[in-house]
Each structure stands twice: as C-alpha cells, then as structure tokens.
Image (tube, rainbow, N blue to C red):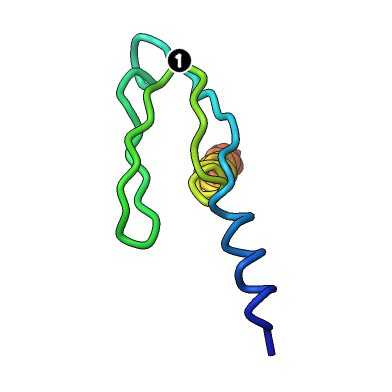
C-alpha cells in the first residue's frame, strides 16, 4: 500500500511546473490547445514557451506520440 508520504510525493511530481513549447504555423497548428486533466482545463498558447503542470505536459506528449503512430499507420496502408 502506498503511504501518505508516497502519495504526497506523487502528487507533487505531477503538479510540478515544467516548460513546454507547442509548434505553431499558419495552418493546422495555429490555434491554442486545450488540455483537460481531472476536470481542470488548461489552455496553452502555441509558439510561446510556458510552464504547465507535469500531468499536462505528459498528456501533450502522449497525444503527440499517438498522432505520429496514426500517421505511420495511414502511410503503411498506402502501400
């Protein structure tokens, strides 16, 4: 079982602010990104370095990896 101290350390880890910079262009990647974690919304501006809780950065990273995997899958279907 997790101790209270371990739970607090885990919560602190996921709440720690970390830097992110989302790519911005003038077509597909121009709008702000909204991330919702445990019912809390975070709106992140593209093209500007910002600090967000680590849990938000992890959601963004997983989303990027899923998008890359989907692109690879689509390319594999083309032959």
| Residue projecting furthest to the bottom | 1
Q: Does residue 55 lie above or below 1 as drawn? A: above
Q: Does residue 65 lie above or below 30 as drawn? A: below
Report the number of discs: 1
- Give the quadrant of residue 4: bottom right
Residue plotted at (66% across, 64% down): 9
Q: Does residue 66 lie above or below 5 as drawn? A: above
Task: Determine whether, in the image, residue 47 is placed left or right of residue 45.
Answer: right
Residue plotted at (48% across, 46% down): 56
Q: Identify the residue position indicated by label 1 in the image.
A: 47
Q: Secondary structure at mark 1?
A: loop
Q: Residue 15: horizontal and vertical position, in percent?
A: 54, 51
Q: Residue 6: horizontal and vertical position, in percent?
A: 69, 73
Quick one: quadrant of the C terminus? top right
Quick one: quadrant of the N terminus? bottom right
Residue plotted at (36% across, 21% down): 28
Residue plotted at (54% across, 39% down): 64
Task: Determine whether, in the image, residue 9 is placed left or right of residue 27.
Answer: right
Q: Does residue 37 lie above or below 79 as drawn? A: below
Q: Nearer the viewer, residue 36 or 8?
A: 8
Q: Nearer the viewer, residue 68 or 38?
A: 38
| Residue projecting furthest to the top | 26
Q: Residues within 10 Å of mark 1 (few under 14, many from 20)?
A: some
Task: Determine whether, in the image, residue 64 is placed left or right of residue 26.
Answer: right
Q: Nearer the viewer, residue 67 or 23?
A: 23
């Amino acid at each position: 079982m997790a101790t209270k101290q371990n739970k607090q350390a885990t919560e602190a880890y996921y709440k720690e602010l970390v830097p992110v910079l989302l790519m911005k262009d003038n077509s597909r990647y121009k709008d702000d990104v909204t991330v919702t974690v445990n019912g809390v919304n975070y709106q992140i501006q593209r093209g500007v370095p910002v600090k967000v809780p680590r849990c938000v950065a992890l959601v963004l990273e997983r989303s990027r990896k899923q998008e890359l995997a989907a692109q690879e899958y689509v390319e594999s279907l083309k032959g």
